[in-house]
Structures are given as structure tokens and as C-alpha cells.
Image: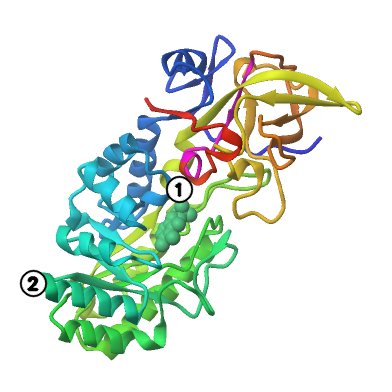
Amino acid sequence: MKPLGPIPSGFTAVDGVLAIDGRRVTDLIDQAHGTPLFVYSRAMLADRVAQLRRAMPERLAIHYAVKANPYEPILEVMSELVDGFDVASGGELAVAFKAGVSPQRISFAGPGKRDAELAAAIHQGATINLESEGEAARALAIALREGLTPRLAIRVNPDFDLKGSGMKMGGGAKPFGLDAERVPELARQIIGAGAEWRGFHIFAGSQALSADAIIETQAQTIALAVELTSQIGAPLPHCNLGGGFGIPYFSGDEPLDIARIGAALEEQFANLPDEFAATQFCIELGRYLVGEAGVYLTRIVDRKISHGETFLVTDGGLHHQLAASGNFGTVVRRNYPVAIATRFDAPVEEAATIVGCLCTPMDKLADKAGFPRADVGDVVAIFCAGAYGASASPAQFLGQGPAHEMLI
Ligand SMILES: *Cc1c(COP(=O)(O)O)cnc(C)c1O
């Protein structure tokens, strides 16, 4: 049998059925008119942000990376909980705006911003994290034509990356940001052109579970911001330190020690030169804030045996949960935390492979793992589904269409 990932804390069994915030998933499925269904918990989102705030220095602002989950009710909840939003497309900018997030709290990163997207950000007053000199020239030209003052930051491609991160987004040749040595010149140019200087965005990687790696990267990031600021010769108003806080998805993964990260950051802040006394620092997190607050529920429609192996075939699949199938940024396929939700407190009785309903061998939700005996009509729960689920999966693949989503 292959191991399953660890089920996040906070879930219980009520009458043997998985419950989210004390509500049985079978009731939630009835309320949502069926499976497949993503359920997100408002209480878990609030708890997560509260724990993080307790661990981090008071001075540190917390931003939500909308990419992780752009479901509008989640954005509405997050807008009450966090200080800022980071978006990565004109589409995300529009949904954040629609969810009532004030543009002063939004920053817009991402390569390949079209003129219309830059214009929308400038009109609304969102900060643009510039990804290149060419993008800077286009943003300045649009602002000049419209008679507006753009709020501009520079995304820096640092010379280091976040060790052990699942997705490296800094260090070496990258389509993201401007190589650090070219940043001072562009910063002086945009300040000289009359833009509102908003500082740096330095993002070095994602999904790290090592506090030491994050502490080291944050120290390097702050040192780089100090060095670049001295070369630019203007005060640093704002610095986005990136994120990279991971969550345990797989067997053997341990939760991140955020208390240590917070303490180290407090010390970093205490040691900053005086001219950074007014600099606002933030981190931007996606999966850490929303990942564990979401569960994907799918119903078993067939049970079959092939060459002695038991297959449980569900009405869901990788078209909603690409990451659980191992096809979203992972090299080796490993099992997510998965359970039979309708037999949540029953003991393991057999090894089974849980698949989706797509006609492709990629559509595997759990491979040869131990479960209570489940049959047609039982519900499968995939945990850690709050981030990179519905919006990061090919919903139209094989004509299946999207899952239901609900926030409770
Ligand atoms: C994807 C991304 C994030 C969020 O990453 P998580 O691993 O979900 O925390 C944050 N910032 C930038 C620039 C990103 O591209």
C-alpha cells in the first residue's frame, strides 16, 4: 500500500461522516445539489490568518495571492482578513475589485501584461509590479496619455532562490521580474518620470516547508532591498518579501514552524538601518492561507476489479483537482490526503485506487492506498483542496464541466 498525505487538523466525524465546521458533508452536498463539490470553510480561513498574525511581527502586512483561489466569496472573506491582495492578471484585478477590495490594497504582478490591463490598474490606482523595462515604458506612456500618476513597483529577479521550494521563481534566467543589477537604473527612471514609487516585489519561490530556508531567503531579500535602495538613493516606501510558506500535502511532510519565522523576521526588522523605519513590509501567501480550508468531494459511481486491483471510479477527477492527480508542478506522483468521507471513522480494510471519470490514465486521485471498504454511492474527500483546485484545473477537458463550489 502507498501512504496517503496527512489530513489537516480541524475535521471531525459526525455519525461516521466527515464534518466540516461540524456539518456533515452529505448535508452540504444535498444543499449544493450534488457532487463534485468544493467546500471552503470561513472559520478555517479566519483561524489561519489569526494564527499567522500572532506569529508574525506586527509591522508585517499579510497579502493574499488571488491566484491560489479566486472564488468570489473567498475574496470577500479574505478582504476582511488580510491587508492586501496580489493579482496576476487583468481578470484577477477585476474579480478583486468586484469583491470590494480597494485598489489601494491591490498590487498587480505577472509577465505579459497587456496595455488594457496596465491601463485598468492605473485608472483604479492599483500598484503595478513591473516585470521589465518594456513594461515600464508602456505603463509610463499610458499614464502620461491619460494624465494619471501610476503607482509603480519593480519586481526583482534575485540571484538566490528559496531552497527546497516546490516551484522556483527566482535565481538565474527567469521570465519574472528584472535582474537585480538593472533595478536601480529603472527605479531612478520611473521616479524621474513622476510615477509614485512603490518599491520592490521580491518573490523567490513557493511551497517550502523548511522554516530555515524561508528565514534565510527573507534575510537575503531584506539585504537585497537595503542594497538596491542605497543605489537608488530614494526612500523605500514598500517591500513585498514574497511568500513561499508551504502546507503538508504528502506523507512525511511536516507543517511549517511559523513561530520561528516570525521571531527571525522580528530580529531582521530590529536590525534595519534607520532610513527604513517607515518602510512597509508584506508577505504574499496563497496556499498557506486557503489550501487547508478547502475539501473536494466526489461520489463513487463504480467499483471494479482489474488484475486483482480494486478501482473506485468517481464522478470527479483531475479536471477539478489537477494537483491531486500529480500533474500540477510535481515530478513524482504521490498521494494527497484522501479519505472515504461517508466512512470517515472506519478502519482501513483494503487497498484501492481512486480514479476520476476522465478517459485518461492521468486521472488518478489516490494510488493503491488503504481505505475502509467503499462502494457505489460513498463519497470521497480530497483534502488540501482550497488552493489551486477549481481554477487551476482543466474543467472543460473531456466535456466534464466545472464542479460546484460553496463557502460555509
Ligand atoms: C503563485 C504566487 C504566489 C502564491 O504562491 P503560494 O505557493 O500559493 O503561496 C505568490 N506570489 C507570486 C508572485 C506568485 O506567483
Mark 2, residue position: 147
Q: Residues within 10 Å of mark 1 (few under 14, many from 20)?
A: many
Question: Looking at the picture, which amino acid does disc 2 mark?
Answer: Gly
User: For residue 306, what is the image quadrant?
Assistant: top right
Element type where label 1 sits in the image: helix
| 393 or 210, nearer to the observer | 393
Q: Which residue is mark 1?
A: 288
Image quarter where ligand 1 lies = bottom left
| Most common secondary structure along the magenta stretch | loop
Residues at circles 1 and 2 in contact by the CB criterion of under 8 Å: no
Q: Is residue 196 magenta?
A: no
- Left-right relation of 78 to 286: left
Side (left or right) of 396 relative to 278: right
Pick out the residue farthest to the front: 399
Identify the magenta region: 378-390
| Residue drawn at point x = 70 percent, y = 31 percent | 355
Would residue 148 be seen by someone viewing this image from the given angle?
no
Where is residue 160 drawn, in percent x and y? 51, 77
Q: Is residue 324 shown left or right of residue 369?
A: left
Residue at 70% over, 45% down: 334
In the depicted structure, whether residue 306 falls above or below residue 148: above
Element at badge 2? loop
